[in-house]
Structures are given as C-alpha cells and as structure tokens.
Image: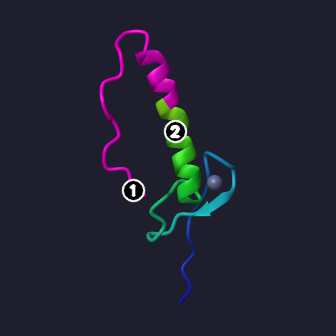
Amino acid sequence: MKQKYRTVTCPTCGKAVEWRPENKFKPFCSERCRLIDLGEWAAEKYRVAAEDEPLSGEAGAGRPE
Ligand SMILES: [Zn+2]
C-alpha cells in the first residue's frame, strides 16, 4: 500500500517537503534549512533584546550537532 503524504513548502528555501513522520525537520526540508531559519530568528531576537539588556551566557543549550 502506498501512502500519500501531505506536502508543505520549506519556509527557508521554498522546496516542496513531504510531511512524513520520519522527517524530524518539518516543515523544513532539511536540518540545514531549519538551522538557517532558527538562526535568522535568533539574530532578530538578539538584535531587539540587545537594546534592553546585555546577553548573558549561552541561551541555546542542547543544540544538536
Ligand atoms: Zn529547505
């Protein structure tokens, strides 16, 4: 039996991504795209936060290699 997966668009590169249970990076197509998106989000956040308070230590602990 062939299962048809829902398809989403990778927010980073716009590529079509099958919403498979084994795709742990969804809605991104890959870990690379996920990290790029998270990186941009964090940069944006830090840029705003930096105006109020200084960075203290590592905020993103437990990031997988
Ligand atoms: Zn992508």
Residue 5 position in % (x across, y down): 56, 70
Q: What residue type is labelled 1?
A: Pro
Vertical side of 15 occupied by 1: above or below: below
Q: Mark 2 points at which residue?
A: 39
Q: Residue at x 61, y 46 (%)?
A: 11
Residue 39 position in % (x across, y down): 52, 39
Q: What element carries label 1?
A: loop
Q: Which amino acid does label 2 sit on?
A: Gly
Vertical side of 43 occupied by 52: above or below: above
Question: Please, which colouring scheme is shown?
Answer: rainbow
Q: Which residue lies furthest to the bottom in this view?
A: 1
Sort mark 2 into few (<14), some (14-19) or many (20+) by Cα contacts within 10 Å: few
State which image quarter holds ligand 1: bottom right
Q: Which residue is drawn at 43% across and 58% down?
A: 65
Q: Which dot marks residue 64?
A: 1
Residue 49 position in % (x across, y down): 41, 17
Q: Is residue 54 left or right of residue 44?
A: left
**Label 2 CB sits under 8 Å from any ligand 1 atom:** no
- First in sequence: mark 1 vs mark 2: 2
Give the image quarter of residue 24: bottom left
**Is residue 46 or residue 12 the one in the foreground?**
46
Vertical side of 53 occupied by 37: above or below: below
CA–CA distance in space, label 1 to label 2 = 14 Å
Q: What element carries label 2?
A: helix
- Tell me if residue 53 is in the magenta stretch: yes
Q: Residue furthest top?
A: 52
Give the magenta range. Answer: 43-65
- Tell me if residue 60 is in the magenta stretch: yes
Q: Magenta residues: mostly which secondary structure?
A: loop
